[in-house]
Amino acid sequence: MGGKPVDMFGVKHFRSLGAWACGALLWLFITSTVFSATPETLCPICGNRLGTSAFLLTKRGHEEKVTVCADCGKLETTCYICGLPVKNKAMRLADGRLLCSDDAKQAVLTQDEAQKIFDDIKRDIQSMLSRHGVLPHHNIHLVLEAKARLDKTGGNLISAHDDRMLMGLTRSTSDESGKFEHTVSLLYGLTRERLMAVAAHEYGHAWLHENVRRKLNQDAVEGFCEWIAYKVIVQRNAPYETKVLLESDYSQGQLQAFIAAEKEHAFYRLIQWVKSGVDPELDREHLERILVLREGNSEPAPALAFAPITPRAPMTNLVLKGLSGGKARRFALINDSTLTVNEQAKVRLGESNVVVHCLEIGSDSAIIQVAGESERRTLRLIEW
């Protein structure tokens, strides 16, 4: 790259910062139960009859069960994405990984398609973080990698996790003038939605390198990147990938802490803690600690960004507390919830919740529809 390695988080040379949320998942993330089956039913894996006993398997990120015959339930060949057993209908990638027929249909196998997905995700995150620091853009080089090359690039830096689930890496370097260059490697053969989540995670690493000058624990670093991926995946309505992220323990609970901290103290406050906080990681039991910043590092809330708020009694009416984002994607902070256009969520109101559907977001207002009400409401931005 022609630059020097970055050691911002105490990681010598470069760190495999993107083993991603799935890194902590077991290679076979399926639960199985043997039960009596209807003999005439066909196994979806091999096409043979189930016989008198079969297995109930659960795909990664899914709730529904898949019934397979006893022989297929014992197979060691599994789909890299969903974890279900595969047989003659599987797609075998050049690096030896197998994909079931469903995941093979969604597999991203070309650099051009991966670049387009990455660019779309990058725009989403840039809109989200548009008023919170430097946004890496033209200084990111994307590479679609085979599994062996990705593992070789990561070396032994992710030995604490399952190397077989490594899906992305980010290498960041800077020259003497402080100019950054980032190389993001993504694993080829992932489904589109899985690649979106990995791409968002890796962009999070690039953003951290350019905007954070304090040390965060590695779990907090990964938790932040998972949180960015989580927000993007939720916005894009990908429930299976959302479930995979939430069920992963890759960040040792930091993802869940980031989600809880945003709900309690708002997006702006959490970004401010990442950049200028005192603690090296989030404490789920003491989320008020994100309000403690290094002396002289408190930043004023940027225009149209979420204003900092202090804890107070539950609100008894719906209030538009803040706006953020760019023209392409805007966000409204209503009471304790962040919504974008066409998004629906539960919003805290008094001691209970109401379901709010965000219809429009303007320069100083938001139009919403509250479940059970026939009339729309227009909320105006107020000082807090």
Image (spheres, rainbow, N blue to C red):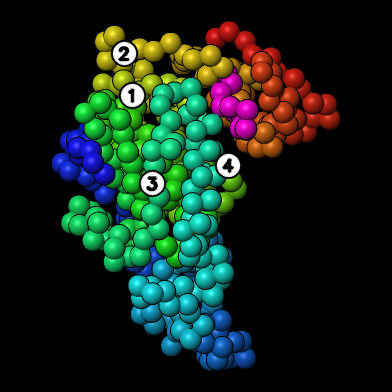
Closer to the N terminus: mark 3 or mark 2?
3
Res. 275 mark? 1
- Amino acid type for the residue under numbered disc 1: Lys
Q: Report if the CB atoms under discs 3 and 2 are less than 8 Å apart.
A: no
Disc 3 designates what residue? 141
Disc 4 designates what residue? 235
Rendered view: 257 above or below 130:
below
- Amino acid type for the residue under numbered disc 4: Gln
- Residue 27 is situated, as x and y percent measured from the top left of the image, at 34, 66
Find out whether residue 325 is within the magenta segment.
Answer: yes
Residue depicted at 29% across the width and 66% down the height: 148
Magenta-drawn stretch, dominant element (helix, strand or loop)? strand
Residue depicted at 66% across the width and 18% down the height: 363
In screen coordinates, is 250 left or right of 330?
left
Rendered view: 155 above or below 295:
below
Closer to the N terminus: mark 1 or mark 3?
3
Work out whether residue 91 or residue 285 is closer to the camera in this orientation and state it: 91
Res. 297 mark? 2
